[in-house]
Structure formats: structure tokens, C-alpha cells
Image (cartoon, rainbow, N blue to C red):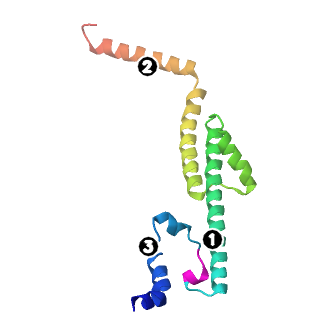
Amino acid sequence: MAFLMNQMLGDKLKSFTGGGDEGNGKAGAEVKETAESKGMSREEFEEYQKQMVEEKIQRDKDFATRKAERANLRVALRDKYRLPDSTQDTALVEMAGDDIDVPEELAKMVDEDEEEEEANDSFLDRLQNLDMDTLKTKAQATMTEMKQNAEEKCTLM
């Protein structure tokens, strides 16, 4: 009786439990999927396989795009801060072509950094454009004025 039950339900139970007692995990992984093992007709199984391949190709394409976007950002940052180039990043950008843009979130972060640097640059520009001679004369005049006020108020000096 057990033999008869095993023959009738064995294949369905194996597909339900993941293959049953076929040795170690490697043996189960090496078993090729078939339409019968998935409980589908041949046409359904072929459509399923086709869909799986298309999804894998799309995932790989999206991954490569994200990877190229990151490389593009690193190249832009290296150019901005005058750092040495990375051959790996330049190769990724060249492989991706001109279709790759910097992701929106990263572009926003870079723009915010640039705005902060512009604010700092404007202060530095004002400092550099300041006439040192006039600043020096104003400082000396202020010091002599403070000295005179101190001499007038202090009886010891």
C-alpha cells in the first residue's frame, strides 16, 4: 500500500517539499526544472522561463545603469576637487556611454555642497579683494585713537 501511495503522490510531494531526500543540497540544486516539476503545461513553463530570463536581463541592466551613474558621479567629484582619476570609473562611464546621468538625490546633494562652497567663496573673494593698505591705516588710526582716550582717562600714563 505504501508503494502505491508513493507512486501516486511522490512527484507532487517532492515538488512541494523541494525535492525530498536526494542526498546533500548540491544534488537538489543540480536538478533541472521541468514543466512537470513545476506543475505547469509545457507552454506555461516556456512562458515562465522566458519571463524569468527577461526579468534577469532587466535587473542586470538596471544594476549596470546604477553602477555607471555612481561612477559618473565619482568622476565628476574627482574633477571638481582635482583628485586623481580612477581607471575603473572612467572605464565604466565609457562603457555606459552618454546615456548616464547623475541620480537625482545625488545631484541635489552635490548642488547643496556647491551652494555652500559658493557662499564660502564669496567671503574669500571679498577678503582677497580687500585693500590691505586701507585696512592697515584704519587699524593704526583706531589704535592711536584708543591710546589717546586711554591717556586722557588714566592719570598714571
Quarter of image, res 54: bottom right
Q: Which residue is mark 1?
A: 55
Disc 1 residue type (three-letter)? Glu
Q: Which residues are magenta?
A: 33-38
Q: Which mark is residue 134?
A: none
Q: Which residue is mark 3?
A: 21
Disc 3 residue type (three-letter)? Asp
Q: Residue at x 54, y 49 (%)?
A: 112
| Viewer-proximal residue among 72 and 4 | 4
> Where is residue 78 drawn, in percent x and y?
63, 39
Q: Secondary structure at mark 1?
A: helix
* Disc 1: CA contacts within 10 A as few (<14), some (14-19) or many (>=20): few
Label located before the other in sequence (1 or 2): 1
Q: Secondary structure at mark 2?
A: helix
Image height check: is 95 above or below 86?
below
Q: What distance separates the C-alpha of mark 3 from that of mark 2?
A: 95 Å
